[in-house]
Image (spheres, grey):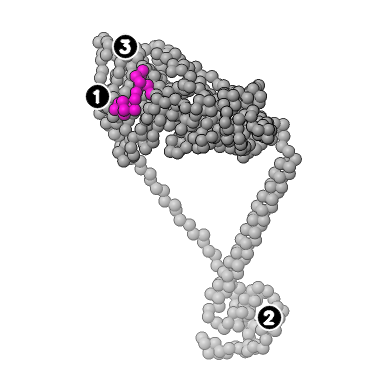
Amino acid sequence: MFSKDTFYLLLIVIHTGSVQSIYKRWKPNTNFENPSNWNVGRVPCGSDIVKFATGDALSPTVYIQTNTSMKELWLPMNGEMIFGDNSILSFTDTATDDASCPDADGELEYIRGPKEWVDPDNWCYSQTERGDCRDIPLLDSEKVPGLYDDVVFPPEKSFFVTLGVDMAFKVKSLKISGSSMSTSSFKSFVQSADGSRMFPSPNQGAGVLSSVTISRTKCKTPKSGCSSGNDQGQILDEICKIYKDRCNRARCQSSLTPLASCCQICGGLFNVTIDTGFNITEFESILQTQFLTGKTGTEMIVSRLSIKEDLVQVVIRDKTGEVSTKTAMDIKKDMDNDLSRGGHKYAISAVSFAVSGAGIGPNGPSASTGKLGGGSITGIVIGILIAVAIVGLVLYLLNVNNRRNLRNRVNRLTQSASNATMGGGNPITRRIQTLRHNFNRDDDLQSIGTELGTINTSFENQMFGEPLDDRNIQDFHLSLSESQPPTFDRLGFDNPLYDTKESGSTVKESSKKKKKDAGDGGHL
């Protein structure tokens, strides 16, 4: 049994590119006694009803290394359980008052599904096979086992691992429950019934199950370091596909994305071309001692990359870049001075450099005093004034347009009503009537007559056959009743209500049920 993992953070890290043995240990397990494998966050106990997945879906191998009781246990249709030494499952109908076994308020369900090999969070870094996990800064691609890593699936644990499709992983060594694997033996194990429960095959048509090559080779250039091999291609793409959504937001302007990484950072990046005599351990030691000592919260990652044969990447980062950018610029200045004198201090022949912008957010320079600068305040005020002016102009134009449309509509309705009252009639008479309605004064009518010019003031009435003369034309107009605009009812309609009917179906799944009375509890 492994001791309980202890995690601690190294704020300033010397990268392990020159370390001969790097162990990557798989963290998740499918053990019965793992609380995270159950829907209520605790292991079965007392009078719980315990259920594994029903149906034909593949269930993982479950290792049981505990003594506990329950009321019922529903076994999976397609699964496997392995009992450790002296493990006991007993069955009872008696409820427990144990405070450590609260009522589950229903059934306990086993919920552990497969975990991805390329997920960086599923691996921990250790310098020994059984050593504590160390939570240290690494490039995202370096957190997944690489070409010179020793991979360990610890004993007395069961696993459910998705290898993915169409990828070719390469590792130095591989142990599963204490047994060392070769490339061929691991392939045979994965294809066996037991192995397929730990490393399930992909769905039909999804692709070919990824391979794992166990090279048993060490880094051939330990002095200058070696690449993990995961820093480009499909493996890096799959790592970032999973990990990118978990990245913390970079709290700086013009953030940077290192090679072989998925997340943006604040600080500085160096791509260094190494020269004859380069020693990665000495290189890291100079940077650590001269530039990073005492700078809490600033991290350094030095990595050999396979993108270019003589490339070393240096990452200097912190949360906002407030300290790391200054540190990176100091390092760059020192490297330039060394290059001008022959490059003997660092044993490098060239260096390219990039730095992020000013920090933002709670710890950024813009918020360090708790006040906004004068330029920021001026910009905000001008922006607000422009926005208010635009909104006011839009409202004014809408109001003018609405009033104009309303006036035109009233005029059209009035004209239509006048025409309806007059009947067909003489067009000149309708013109005079409309103008009279507008002005309603005799002197105005005289001016309108002048405007129209010389006209005949009588016409032959088709209805009566008697023409009107000059003497009674005025009386005729005055006898006409003033037309009133018609009143239009505002019509509406009822919006019908639609009944929403919900239907459901209940799917019942059958499982094999294993139950044992309390009085008959015993070893399984």
Q: Is residue 17 visible?
A: no
Q: From the viewer's perspective, tell me whether residue 48 is left or right of residue 432.
A: left
Q: From the viewer's perspective, tell me whether residue 196 is left or right of residue 352.
A: left
Mark 3 = which residue? Answer: 85
Residue 28 image offset from top left, x and y in percent: 41, 23
- SS for callout 3: loop
Q: Amino acid at mark 3?
A: Asp
Quarter of the image for residue 39 reads top left
Q: Real-space Cα distance between discs 3 and 2?
A: 117 Å
- Residue 187 lies in the magenta stretch: yes
Q: Amino acid at mark 2?
A: Ile
Residue 518 image offset from top left, x and y in percent: 28, 11
Q: Amino acid at mark 1?
A: Lys
The residue stretch that appears in magenta: 174-190
Residue 512's tag is: 1
Quarter of the image for residue 157 reads top left
Classify mark 1: residues with Cα within 10 Å, few (<14), some (14-19) or many (20+).
Answer: few
Q: Residue at x 57, y 35 (%)?
A: 273
Going from N to C along the chain, the mark reached first, 3 or 2, is 3
Mark 2 = which residue? Answer: 448
